[in-house]
Image (cartoon, helix red, strand yellow):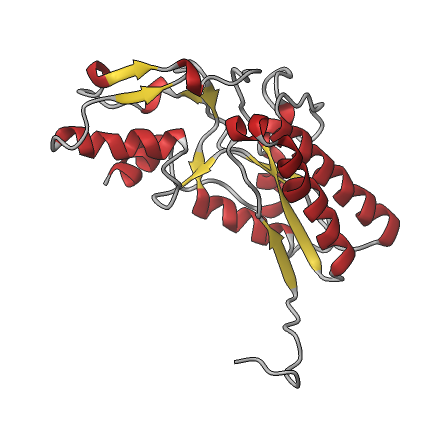
Amino acid sequence: MPTSTTPPPSPDEVYNLAAQSHVVVSFEIPDYIADVVATDALRLLEAIPYSVLPAGSSEMFGSTLLPHTESSPFHHRSPYAVSKCAAHWYTVNYQEAYRIFACNGILFNHESPRRGENFVTWKITRAVGRIKIGLQSKLFLGNLQASRDWGFAGDYVEAMWLMLQQEKPDDYVVATEESHTVGGILRSGIWDHVVIDKRYFRPAEVDNLKGIATKAKKVLGWKPKVGFEQLVKMMVD
């Protein structure tokens, strides 16, 4: 156990992925979202002199034209997206003003078997198994036409690490460059169990998000290794 004589840890790199990232919930508690996502990012920049990478979100692009790159404008359509934009610009400001090594990783949707059950990807893939063995009869979902650029979280962690290994800080979009609808995650035999529930629609919908990761591929030498179907299979299994 640490004691008063033990020096505090001194990391070389800090990756800030802390957030309440459920977009629908952000409409219910916007003040909390602003504090945790935006203001905490500022506090972290104030507190540490190390290399830092705050995880941005494709939600910052909102309803702007596809595809999305580092130069695409932001049009945030939720309190979560607004707060992520604030954290993004805090990072840019501190990099320019204080020359700290800070990069914005603008991450499109990234999933894994560890995804929380309140997110649609895990909600669907979990239901596949439960319905097949009789533990669940209905799957309540919202907008099946919402389209997202879904990638594997492990691939995105590699991209974030590569950002902080560069000589100069910069911002990067991390994406698979493919978009799929929520309905596209549904497997055969599941459709008859789906019930559309208005509770799961957002007050301001974002219909489609799709990123272009040309810069990350060229500068970082990064590319996604896990495709969409492989990702879905990984989560179902």
On the rendered structure, is 168 left or right of 143? right
- Residue drawn 47% across the image and 24% down it: 148
Q: Nearer the viewer, residue 189 or 168?
A: 189
Q: Position of residue 6 (x, y in %)?
A: 63, 83
**Quarter where residue 60 is shown:** top right
129 shown above or below 183: below
147 shown above or below 120: above
Confirm whether residue 212 shows in the render: no
- Residue drawn 29% across the image and 40% down it: 234
Q: Nearer the viewer, residue 77 or 113?
A: 77
Q: Position of residue 23 (x, y in %)?
A: 53, 29
Q: Position of residue 34 (x, y in %)?
A: 67, 37
116 shown above or below 50: above
- Residue drawn 65% across the image and 47% down it: 54
Q: Position of residue 57 (x, y in %)?
A: 59, 34
101 shown above or below 91: below
Confirm whether residue 228 shows in the render: yes
Image quarter of the C terminus: top left
Direction bottom: furthest residue: 5
